[in-house]
């Protein structure tokens, strides 16, 4: 099956610094990638939809200046948490869906990134 | 608009017993439905998906789910629980029509298995 690679799997950063998380589709092209945030023992909350070559679409309540998304190629999307604070500590997961076919509408998920801001 | 509701945040069954995890969906367009499993500190793994072909869908690890349009349900079952099934399970919905459509998740059900 298709593979989505997310890096890093775990990161600890100091408050006020920025952290970049990468999401790569390894064996398929993805015009659209999704970024989710998951709090402990809760579901995945969609943060934004990342569109190759254009601006990301953010969900209501998600600060676009706080969570910068760049989708520079058909296989890579990045999420940068700017000026991180302890409340940004969470599990971030990306997903990608195959481009251009209705037969493969499932999303493939990265392994997740555990961000801890100290 | 689309949404899913998972009934029961925590389900506990004995090893060897039937597993039933409930999911009801709401969708203004024909839905694609999924069940994902998540183990601690890991991403999501697809168990099975409904894509408008057969209404009874078989997935990995002995799981299956039945799409019932009249009941707007997509419940997940497994005849005999195994200890390794203990995990968090998420039901999800997206649009049939577009691979760019959002995937919306339910709140999740934690499955515990008693020895």
Image: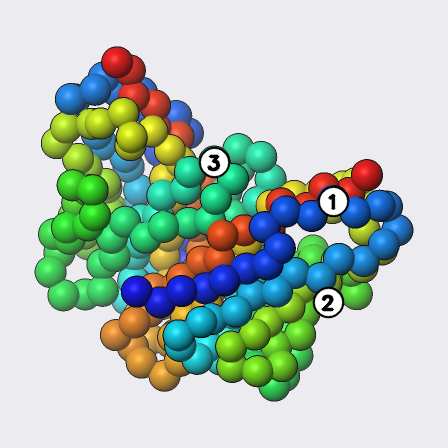
Q: Which residue is mark 1?
A: A12
Comes first in the chain, label 2 or label 1: 1
Q: For residue B11, what is the image quadrant?
A: top left
Q: For residue B8, what is the image quadrant?
A: top left
Residue that appears at 29% across and 21% down:
B113
Task: Name the colour scheme.
Answer: rainbow
Q: Secondary structure at mark 1?
A: strand
Q: As drawn, is B31 to the left or to the right of A45? A: left
Q: As drawn, is A47 to the left or to the right of B31? A: right
From mark 2 to mark 1, how far is it between C-alphas?
18 Å
Residue that appears at 29% across and 77% down:
A102
- Count of marks, rendered view: 3
Chain of the residue displaying label 3: B
Q: Which residue is mark 3?
A: B40
Which label sits on residue A54?
A: none
Chain of the residue displaying label 2: A
The answer, for residue A62, to whether it is visible in the render is yes
Q: Quadrant of the C terminus of chain A?
A: top right
Q: As drawn, is B80 to the left or to the right of B2? A: left
Residue B104 x/y as whole percent: 44, 55
Which label sits on residue A68?
A: 2
Q: Are marks 2 and 3 in contact (CB under 8 Å)?
A: no
| Towards the viewer: B86 or B109 | B86
The local crowd at label 3, few if under 14, some if 14 to 19, many if 20 or more residues have their Cα within 10 Å, is: few
From mark 2 to mark 3, how far is it between C-alphas?
27 Å
């Amino acid at each position: 099956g298709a593979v989505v690679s997310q890096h890093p799997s775990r990161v600890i950063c100091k408050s006020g610094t920025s952290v970049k998380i990468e999401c790569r589709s390894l064996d398929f092209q993805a015009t659209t990638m999704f970024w989710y945030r998951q709090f402990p023992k809760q579901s995945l909350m969609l943060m934004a939809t990342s569109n190759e070559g254009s601006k990301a679409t953010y969900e209501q309540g998600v600060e676009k200046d706080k969570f910068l998304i760049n989708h520079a190629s058909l296989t890579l999307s990045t999420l940068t948490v700017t000026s991180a604070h302890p409340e940004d500590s969470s599990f971030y997961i990306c997903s990608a869906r195959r481009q251009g076919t209705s037969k493969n509408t499932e999303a493939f998920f990265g392994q997740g990134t555990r961000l801890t801001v100290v | 608009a689309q949404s899913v509701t998972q009934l029961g945040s925590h389900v506990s069954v004995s090893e060897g017993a039937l597993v039933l995890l409930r999911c009801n969906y709401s969708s203004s367009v024909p839905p694609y439905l999924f069940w994902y499993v998540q183990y601690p500190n890991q991403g999501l793994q697809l168990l099975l998906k409904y894509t408008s072909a057969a209404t009874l869908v078989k997935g990995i690890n002995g799981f299956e789910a039945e799409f019932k349009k009249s009941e707007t349900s997509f419940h997940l079952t497994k005849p005999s629980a195994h200890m390794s099934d203990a995990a968090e399970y998420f039901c999800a919905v997206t649009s049939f029509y577009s691979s760019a459509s959002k995937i919306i998740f339910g709140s999740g059900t934690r499955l515990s298995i008693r020895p």
